Amino acid sequence: METEKQPSPEDQGGGAAPPARSASEDGRGGEAALRLEKRTHLDSGRYRITLRDYGDGLGEIGWSFMSSLRPSKAGRGFSEEREEHEQRAVRRARSRIRHLILATSADHLLTLTYRENVTDFNRACADLSKFVRSVKAKCPGWVYIAVPEQQKRGAWHWHMAVRGRQDVALLRSTWRHIVGEGNIDVNPPRGVGKKRAFALVKYLGKYLAKGFSEGNRALNGRRFRASLGIPVPCESITLPAAERANVSGYELDQLQAATGAVGYVWESGDTLAGWACSWK
C-alpha cells in the first residue's frame, strides 16, 4: 500500500499529535534514549489505538505506546514543562474541534458580532448561551461549534461552524433581540462537500490557536463551545501481539478497511505514536 507521509497532522485538520523530537533535541542525551529503548521493548506497556469513522469515506486513526514505567523528567525546567503543557493543550483542543465538525458534517460558517465594543468575555458567553437557547427552541436539531475571537479594539465575537442552510432572518432577529445593535453573517466556505468541513476545521482551529498564543486569561477553560451530546465516533482497537513489530502498518490497514482510503500519515520519531486520516 502506498501512503503519503507528512511531518505533522496540524495542516491536515487542526492538529492531532506533537511534533517529533529526538532525545538529543530534548536535552536528555544518550542516557534518556537508552531509558526510552528499555521502556519501549522491555516493559509491559500497551498501545492505545483509536479509530474514528465519520462515514462517507472520512475517518482517522491515532496510536501511541502507553508505558507502564513512569517517564523521567530529569533535566527539564519549569518553563520547558509549561511550554510543552500549553502545546499539548492547543493540540487537544484543535483535535476536539476537528472531531466535532466532522461528526456533525458542518458546512457553513456563522459569525456573531457586536456593534458596541463588548470587552467583557463573561457577557459574550452569556449572550451566546441566550442565543443558542432561543434558536434551539425554534430549531431543536440545530447544532453548532463556536470559537471566540477578540478583535484589536477589544471587542469579542463568535465564529461558529453549523450544518446546512440557515434561516438568516431568524438568526439575525434572535441575535439583535439579545444584544441590541449587532449583526450575523452566514457563508459556506470555499469548495464543495467534504472540503467545506476541512475549511471550517482550519478556520476555527486558527482562531483557537490565536487565543492560546495571545495568552488571554479571560478564556481559561472556555476556549470553545459546542452543542451538548454531539455523537463523535470512537472505536478502541486492540493490537494483536503478532503485530507489535508492524504497528503503523496494522493501523493503516484498519483505516483502509474502515474508510477505503489512506491519506496523510504522521509518525513520531521517538514516542511510538502516530496519526493518519483518509483525506489528502
Image (tube, helix red, strand yellow):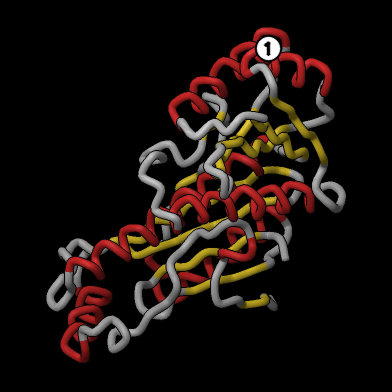
Please, is residue 272 above or below residue 148 in the view? below
Look at the image and tell me in which quarter the C terminus lies: bottom right
Residue found at x 38% / y 58%: 88
Quick one: which residue is furthest to the top in this view? Answer: 137
Helix or strand or loop: what does disc 1 sit on? helix
Residue found at x 79% / y 53%: 195
Pick the residue in front: 218 or 6.
Answer: 218
Please, is residue 223 above or below residue 258 in the view? above
Amino acid type, mark 1? His
Pick the residue in front: 27 or 59.
Answer: 27
Please, is residue 240 above or below residue 147 in the view? below
Measured from the top left, where is residue 163 in percent x and y? 74, 32
Measured from the top left, where is residue 190 in percent x and y? 84, 52
Residue found at x 50% / y 71%: 248
Toward which corner of the image does residue 41 lie, by quadrant? bottom left
Residue found at x 64% / y 11%: 134
Residue that label 1 marks: 177
> Is 233 left or right of 136, judged from the image as shown?
left
